[in-house]
Amino acid sequence: MQRVFNFAAGPATMPLEVLEQAQKDLTNYKDVGMSVMEMSHRGNDYEKIHNHAKETLKELLKLDDDKEILFLQGGASTQFTMIPMNLLEKDDKASYLISGSWAKKAYNEAKLLANPEIISSSEDDNFTYIPEFDAKKVNKDSKYIYICTNNTIYGTAIRPSKLEKFDINKPLVADMSSNILSENYDMNKFDLVFAGAQKNLGPAGVTIVIIKKDLLSGISNIPTMLDYNTHINKNSMFNTPPCFAIYMCSLVLDWLKKNGGVDNIEKVNAKKAKLLYDFLDNSKLFNNPVKKEDRSIMNVVFTTGNKDKDMEFIESATKNGLYSLKGHRSAGGMRASIYNAMSYEGVEALVNFMKKFEKENS
Ligand SMILES: *Cc1c(COP(=O)(O)O)cnc(C)c1O
């Protein structure tokens, strides 16, 4: 069987070129005589891969020198705990924008440790829009603002042009799991950013954390593995890092750099999203429930409005080599995740198939 177009939300499609490079290196990496999987993480060969991944990420995101890049385990979900644990004392406040269920999960974890507050939420309309950010609603004692820039499940995003309003002289923390490196955000506006790798960066198993060094205020009694300082002080090698996942990310980052970096992929991503949204806006069968200005360019949700028809579409698409289009169980309908590694041709194939399906079902 040939490779399919994989629209999965994560783990997600990766560039074929990267997979082939990994295959070539699999048993004998650069004539070292062993696989990256078999190398000591304390050895020179691995250390080069590790530092190269960091440098390439720093370059692609145009990060200032006061930012530290960490490679951690436990998924993006562990950051929901680590953030309040490292930034809040027991009675401290923080402000959360509840734009989807990942942000809500982060808020609920913070509640176990401190006193987070909700700025606003769009749950009343099943997260089909980005809730309003009113700076006046932020408690003056709040220690940070927490946002999720791309809501993977609901297909909404806080696009770069909307970031400015969060600039209110408080640390800005962002979950960018599903749109890091997809378009040009001013990354130095954030004090802490995290992203599970399995959406736009590589395979599952590593989470990227970018943290401004002076954000940590010296809270004590943090369990060692959950303390950012532990990992900052040891270049993410306090214990064994997920070496192979980091190596795969380094290949993806090289691929992105070779293809013009974020400046170029942003154009490709915009073109892909436009193709799909333009079709949806003119379709008599499919529709997208998201408020237009809040549309994600990474996850595009749509439905026919009829559950059986949706299921028929998903099954028929699968038979035609268009995989994993089923929406998240909490949103229903369909979702096409069109991350960096999804080609324009993939989106074109999807739109052509949708046109055909629409014709046959009208
Ligand atoms: C997938 C996802 C997560 C959860 O990631 P895990 O690595 O599975 O914990 C968190 N936030 C967002 C925005 C996501 O898309």
Image: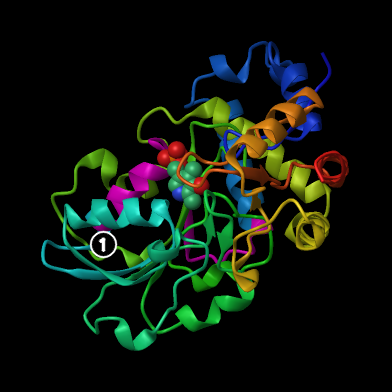
Badge 1 marks a residue whose secondary structure is helix
Classify 10 Å Cα crowding around label 1: few (below 14), some (14-19), many (20 and above).
Answer: some
Residue 258 or residue 312, whichever sits in front = 312
Q: Quadrant of the N terminus?
A: top right
Magenta residues (range): 59-84
- Please say if 301 is above or below 172: above
Q: Nearer the viewer, residue 94 or 153?
A: 153
Task: Provide residue 292's location: percent of width, then percent of height.
Answer: 65, 70
Task: Give the percent coordinates (x, y) of residue 98.
Answer: 38, 64
Q: Residue at 87% of width from left, 44% of height from top?
A: 359
Taking the magenta stretch, the answer to whether it contains residue 134 is: no
From the image, tell me which residue sits under label 1.
87
Tell me residue 44's x, y (percent): 57, 28
Residue 136 seen: yes
**Which residue lies most toward the front here?**
362
Q: Residue at x 63, y 77 (%)?
A: 161
Label 1 within 8 A of ligand 1 by Cβ: no
Q: Nearer the viewer, residue 35 or 286?
A: 286
Q: Where is 200 relative to 294, above or below?
A: above
Quadrant of the rendered structure where residue 350 is?
Answer: top right
* Residue 82 counted in the magenta span: yes
Q: How many marks?
A: 1
Q: Is residue 337 left or right of residue 67?
A: right
Q: Residue at 47% x, 60% y: name it.
A: 127
Q: Is residue 152 left or right of residue 94?
A: right
176 up-or-down from 362: above or below: below
